[in-house]
Amino acid sequence: MKIKTKLNLSVGLLFVMIIILSLVGSYYIFQVKKDTQNILTANYNTLEYSRNMLLALDAIGIDEKKAVSVFEKNLAQQMANITEAGEDKVTGSLQRSFLLLKKDIANESIKNQIRQDIFEIMKLNMRAIKDKADLAKITAETANIWIAVIGTFCFLIAFNLMVNLPNNIANPIRELTESIRQIANKNYSERVHFMNHNEFGDLAKSFNTMAQKLQEYHNSNLYKLSFEKKRLETLINNTHDPIIGLDTDNIVLFVNDEALKILGLKRAEAIGKSATALAASNDLLQTLIHESGNDKQPLKIYADGKESYFEKEVVGITITPTGEDQTIAIGNVIILRNITIFKELDFAKTNFIATVSHELKTPIASIKLSLQLLEQANTGKLNDGQRQLIDSIADDSQRLLKITGELLELSQVETGNIQLNIDKSDPQEIVNYAVEAVKVQAEQKQIEIVVESGEKLPQIKADHEKTSWVLINFLTNAIRYSAEGSKIWVQLKTEQEKVIFKVVDKGKGIDSRYKTKVFDKYFQVPGSPKTGTGLGLAISKEFIEAQHGTIGVESELGMGSTFYFLLTMV
């Protein structure tokens, strides 16, 4: 019998017995409840009415009107609750005696007759209570017997399943697991022997067939060739540098895991396919095969969650066929040598610059403080030459302080140590803060800053300090490249769950050749005054993108520039 059939029959029988047990228990509980309810409704109420009538009968001499009323009420309830044999006859006698008593209220013989009738009714109901209690007891005993019998049967079935079922399933699986382990250890003579005609028997037959075929394959020359191929593939896959093998028709012969990782491909998608066809939808592969020589320019590749740097090397593979003297080319191997560690050394240089910049801030601040002291009247009057020197030192120290600040910000960006405090921020407050920060610079060139915000803007998810820094940088650049007496517009508006910040100026604009480079580190538009380090926009880009925003520029030469960024609403 199949294991599935055994399980279905055993569990099904157990399920049916549990249902029967539930039904039997429910039936007898209902019967006991019914018997108990009959006692309460039929007999207990009659005893209560009889007691009230006796009390009312005794109270006739005290309060005749009230006692008669109570007696009549309980007599009516008793007449509506006649349930036992003979109770109707006694109740009728009681009713007739009560009618006679109402005509002769002081007749003691009639009262005695009434008492005898009431006692007879109580006697009938007391006997009925005893009989019904005995019946309920018999019902409960019968329920106990049936529940015990069915429960015992369910227990025997469950116990049999608990004892036999795990062994029937686990033992063949254990034996099969051990046989698979032997096959994995190249013991291809291993066989399993299940005599049962069930699923395990079919599995054993299939397993033995597989083991026999593996044994035949292992003893063939094809196995040896396959083994050597596996050895080479393992060596290539364990190489930390990405490697791609191509034949003379640019068909991918092999590719290791590192190469698949940076290419974003699966092995089945690459092996045996044309590299040229794959390159049509894979920019990195197109870069790797676009020329046969070696590229000296390092490749920057973002893979596995980090940026890595590689140098490409193409090795031509040639062989000398048996019996011939000339070599022939059979393909190329593209090797990408990982130079990320050298780039990391470059980042260490950046950290060094950041440290030096940080250390420079203190003496520069001291210089500025000393200049402020020299400018005070109580330190002495300065002549024109001294005043010019002090102004020159103040400008240079301010410029040095700005450069060191930008270098520190850049070092945070390059080392990934940007400290963001993302919270709900009011766009209008950010704009007001930035405008106030550049107010003095704008007034020196008599430039008017116009804020355009036509509606109540929602709050955004942003770092207030970093976002204000970016907007101040935009405004500072706009002031620098705008003519005296001109205007600069700061525009705020919403668009698709985002808030757009724009700084618009009417300066000389940016040549289209340089628009894609303005956010690069150290880049300055040719021909512009060398007043900074070229780091401000690069840092701004990192700050905005770290907040999952978008930054950009729109500009035409001679038509001014519009720098903008978008941040998400709360």
Image (spheres, rainbow, N blue to C red):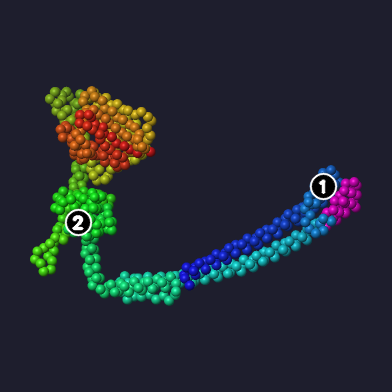
- Residue at disc 1, secondary structure: helix
Q: Which mark is residue 375?
A: none
The image position of residue 84, as x and y in percent, is 78, 58
Residue 231 drawn above or below residue 494: below
The mark lying in front, picked from 1 and 2, is 2
Q: Residue at x 83, y 57 (%)?
A: 120
495 left or right of 74? left
What residue would you read off at disc 1? 72
The image position of residue 309, as x and y in percent, is 20, 50
Kindly check if marks 1 and 2 are in contact, taking CB atoms under 8 A apart as contact.
no
Q: Amino acid at mark 2?
A: Asn
Q: Amino acid at mark 1?
A: Glu
Residue 546 drawn above or below residue 3: above
What residue would you read off at disc 2? 250
Local crowd at mark 1 within 10 Å, few (<14), some, or many (≥20)?
A: some
Residue 393 drawn above or below residue 79: above
- Magenta range is 91-120
The image position of residue 28, as x and y in percent, is 65, 62
* First-in-chain label (1 vs 2): 1
Residue 520 drawn above or below residue 138: above
